[in-house]
Image: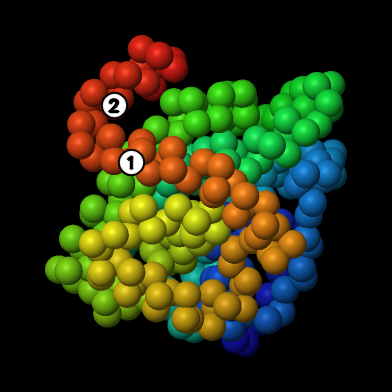
Amino acid sequence: MAHVKKSLELYHAAESICSERVLMTLYEKHIVDWVDCPMLLFEDEQFARKYLKLNPKAQVPTLVHNGRVVRESSIICNYLDDIFPQNSLKPASPHSRANMQEWIKGSDEELYQAVSSLSFSMVFRDRLNGMDRVAREAHFMKQTEIDRTHRQRSCVADGMGSPYVLRAVAAWENLLQKLEAVLEKDGPWILGDQYSLVEIALAPFFMRVQDLQILPIWMQERPLTVEWWNEVKRRSNFIMAQVGVGPDKLLEYELAADKYGSEIKRLRDWYVEDPIDCGRAFKIDKGVL
């Protein structure tokens, strides 16, 4: 723990993969002096006027440090690593740090959308369609980003037929191909011998896909990635952060896997066999990718 007292407030939520990144960072660095501010997203607490002053995007997590706001999970994790120097999660060399930033940028831009699309098309779709039309529209109308709203609407309306689902499948296939090759060359961790912010950036995404029970689709014949993932899950910060959905939600995720898992596998196999034909079919039949 640093000698200077740090006043930290963390606004986060269950089932928020980005919140889990920050929790993993706090526990990995043994930061204990922070205020826990949990939020209920499906009760629309993120749209409260008071919270929107902290985070105009109505997203979690948000960190408040000595009255100053830090937003976006990867930025928060990097910030915590800077202000609490113990157990550094960044490599020393500039080149390795650039490599780290490239991995995290990819997870923020591609993997987040992929996991969000899978979550909405497989699980959250049924929750939102279970609302009456007025309540569902009111939920979407509160959204603050048009791209996110369009993606969520597509996944809720079209399910497995949404082009965002194919994007998600392709993103995971591309990531796993790259990850296996990197671990073979540099392992045991993505940046070599050091567990880093890259593992923290990726871990909650992997856990969500595992909770959806479709992770084995991409893990087949990738033994180094399987070993890497098992080591990530064994770490105390992963366990203490309680990464993954709670036991009260597991049945819902299991039912979603039974309902949609075979279609996800079919799309993955099709994409691997002929990505051009797969993409062309979705562009013609389902909308522009």
Viewer-nearest residue: 206 or 25: 206
Q: Secondary structure at mark 2?
A: helix
Most foreground residue, 54 or 217: 217
Q: Is residue 229 visible?
A: yes
**Residue at 61% in and 23% down:** 157
Mark 1 lies on a secondary structure that is helix
The amino acid type found where label 2 is placed reads Cys
Q: Which residue is mark 2?
A: 278
In percent of width and height, residue 53 lies at 77, 42
Q: Is residue 116 visible?
A: no
Q: Quadrant of the C terminus?
A: top left
**Display colour scheme:** rainbow
The quadrant where residue 6 appears = bottom right
Using the numbered discs, state the Cα–Cα distance from disc 1 to disc 2 in whole angstroms. Answer: 10 Å
In the displayed structure, would residue 270 be above or below residue 91? Answer: above
Question: What residue is rendered at 47% in x and 75% in y?
Answer: 233
Disc 1 vs disc 2: Cβ atoms closer than 8 Å? no
| Residue lying at the far top of the rendered structure | 284
Residue type at the position of mark 1: Arg
- Residue under the image location 55 percent in, 48 percent down: 258
